[in-house]
Amino acid sequence: MWYGLRRLAGVLGVGMMVAGSAAAQVTYTCELTSPQRKAWIPDILFIGHDAEKGRVVISDPIVLHFNDRRPIEGRVSIDNAKRITFAWNYTATDSKGKRAKMLFRATWLKADQEMRITAMPAGYHTGFNGVGTCDRQQR
């Protein structure tokens, strides 16, 4: 199963991490589930993180849909002994032409080896949640 996901990661764009120090690059290939199925939580999430260059690349089917089939840049919002949290935002347009800014956070819990993700429309206090496991590779 993970072999297929790694191959798909390259297709979806995380494999395009810029060459640099091998120790600085980490990729997360994640399978996620959410109680709000078919909402804003993707089934598959790819995160590429180059700590030395301060670069985060995010790709999933929803990002690719709303960003002209390209991954987007993210950022690290928290990095401590317990977790690392990645953040990214983009504007989505629904079928009626209504635009909404979506705010995403994915947190890798280091001890549990678990990814938790939230997606929230800007200006709202509730959103969508998911959880999953990742194949974490340090390059």
Image (spheres, rainbow, N blue to C red):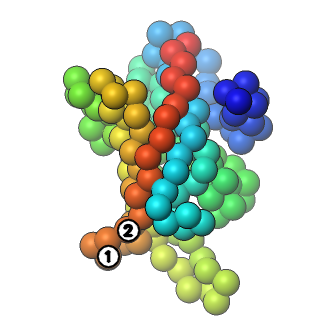
Identity, as a three-letter code, of the amino acid under mark 2: Gly
**Direction front: furthest residue:** 35
Front-lying residue, 73 or 6:
6
Res. 6 visible in picture: no
Name the spot of residue 93 as percent of width and height, x first: 60, 77
Residue, disc 1: 124
**Residue visible at 73% across and 25% down?**
3
Tag shown at residue 127? 2
Front-lying residue, 52 or 89:
89
Tag 1 secondary structure? loop
Res. 14 visible in picture: yes
Q: Residues within 10 Å of mark 2 (few under 14, many from 20)?
A: some
The reply, left or right, for residue 9 in relation to residue 26 is right
**Residue visible at 69% across and 61% down?**
65
Name the spot of residue 66 as percent of width and height, x first: 64, 64
Front-lying residue, 54 or 99:
99
Q: Is residue 99 above or below residue 121?
A: below
Q: Are marks 1 and 2 in contact (CB under 8 Å)?
A: yes
For discs 1 and 2, the disc positioned in front in the rendered view = 2
The reply, left or right, for residue 119 in relation to residue 17 is left
Name the spot of residue 31 as percent of width and height, x first: 57, 41
